[in-house]
Image (spheres, rainbow, N blue to C red):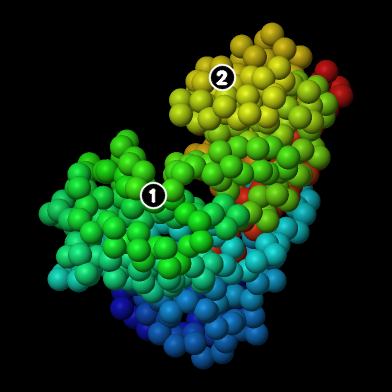
Amino acid sequence: MEKNDIVTVTAESIGTQGEGIARTEGVTLFIPYLLPGERARVKVLKVKGSVGYGKIEEIETPAEERVRPRCSVFQRCGGCQLQHLRYREQLKFKTELVRDTLKKIAGITAPVSPCERSEKEYAYRNKLQLPVGKQGEENAVGFFAERSHRIVPTDECPIHPDWSKQLISALKNFMEKCGLDGYNEQTKRGHVRHIVVRELRRKYIITLVVCVQELKGIDYFVHLLDEIFPEYSLWLNFNDRDTNVIFGEKFTLVKGCGVYDCTDAGISFEAGPNTFVQVNDGVRTKLYEKVLELVEEGPVVDCYSGGGLLTAMLAKKCGRAYGIEVIPEASACANALAERNALMDKMTNVCGKVEQELSAILAREQIKTVVLDPPRAGVERSVLKALMKSAPKRIVMVSCNPATLARDVGILTGTLVETEKGELKKSENPHTMYEIQLIQPYDMFPQTRHVESVVCLTRKESNI
């Protein structure tokens, strides 16, 4: 088999990226958007040894679970991978993804609960984040293609609410009427780089990221936004750096109060243009309720605690909670949240790296539960070692990355051990200090390959 060959294959399974997997002529082919059981003519794009990659030329026998995607740029935009798959099968795929990843990476065979569904299959995102660029002579507003910074222009996105379509139209109108250019990454020139919108219960925080100190025609944009949003704040953010980071340091309020009061699970907080909130309100509520259900009364530590929303919930239930967060602005928000909710005597926020701060808390407090909600890279090895040394009764893990989740759970349960060279290998005789009580996936991101998971580990009584 060689590049550019046309082969006819039948997909046997679905891979971790949502692609179909087929085997032919001794080669395992990965083919995006091909579903298990489908027979198709495929063009070979690359072959290396016994692994190859291809693209669909023609589907000869479609699967019963194939549905028509709602998005006009599906397969070109890099945002969604599963719009062609019936939703119940998406949930099954994500359940199997978590289970198979735990087994493959960490040798863990444990029951995985069915993936908790999102009540909204589409229009679920409360945050819209669009790059704005210049492609040739035309401005482009849309989403990046998979693994690139090439913008795929679009007029709407079905996983966002209807207001997103009106906003995109207004932004294009504004830029055209006022002679503004999108940012060109090659020339490093232009006026507008991104637009970011957060919806907070029918209130909107809109941030236009610009590369110039003064943006002409902003009053016209305000006029257009007035026609769309009943209550909103408009910020300008200045970012002229050569970076992939969306926001610069300088925010200027153009209209509105800038921040809004919000309430979640009885906790009151302020949200501004740079506040992190999970993008799916309904699934976030389910996930946090599960975490609160799993923790016990008594002191708890919330690692990677961000703005402190979950820490505050834990403080209310458990009587005492510590939040550890490395970003000073987020930690300051957590302090304000504690004061706002009269939790100063129950909630302590520590600004620093988890790997540096956790051991001190564990040494001076009788911590019953540690909650871990790390970024995609997972938990630092030193943090896992500190947990195994102090052995809290319960560890609740929240993860958006099945691969790093499997690695971290493997270390804590002893199915993975560290060699003298610092590498991890599967253990034939796990120490089993902790056992798995629960593995629960949540579909925070319908139509995509991504999945959020909650795992609860409890210490074996023989290890007390």
Q: Is residue 156 visible?
A: yes
21 to 37, vertically: above or below: above
The residue lying at 36 percent from left, 43 percent from top is 253
Q: Residues within 10 Å of mark 2 (few under 14, many from 20)?
A: many
Residue 399, percent from left and from top: 61, 43
- Kindly give the residue lying farthest to the left in the view shown: 187
Query: What separation in Å lies between label 2 and label 1 (alpha carbons)?
Result: 34 Å
The residue lying at 64 percent from left, 80 percent from top is 65
Q: Nearer the viewer, residue 150 or 234?
A: 234
- Work out whether mark 2 precedes mark 1 in sequence or the reverse, and give the earlier one: 1
Q: Amino acid at mark 1?
A: Lys
Image quadrant where one finds the C terminus: top right
Whether residue 365 sits left or right of residue 190 in the image: it is: right
Indicate the quadrant where residue 50 lies: bottom left
Q: Determine which residue is flagged by label 2.
A: 350
338 to 140, vertically: above or below: above
Question: Depth-wise, is mark 2 or mark 1 nearer the camera?
Answer: 1
Residue 235, percent from left and from top: 37, 47
Indicate the quadrant where residue 349 lies: top right
The mark tally for this picture is: 2
Residue 71, percent from left and from top: 47, 76
Q: Amino acid at mark 2?
A: Val
- Kindly give the residue lying farthest to the bottom in the view shown: 60
- Kindly give the residue lying farthest to the top in the view shown: 364
Residue 187, percent from left and from top: 12, 54
Q: Determine which residue is flagged by label 1.
A: 255
424 to 386, vertically: above or below: below
The residue lying at 59 percent from left, 81 percent from top is 66
Image quadrant where one finds the N terminus: bottom left
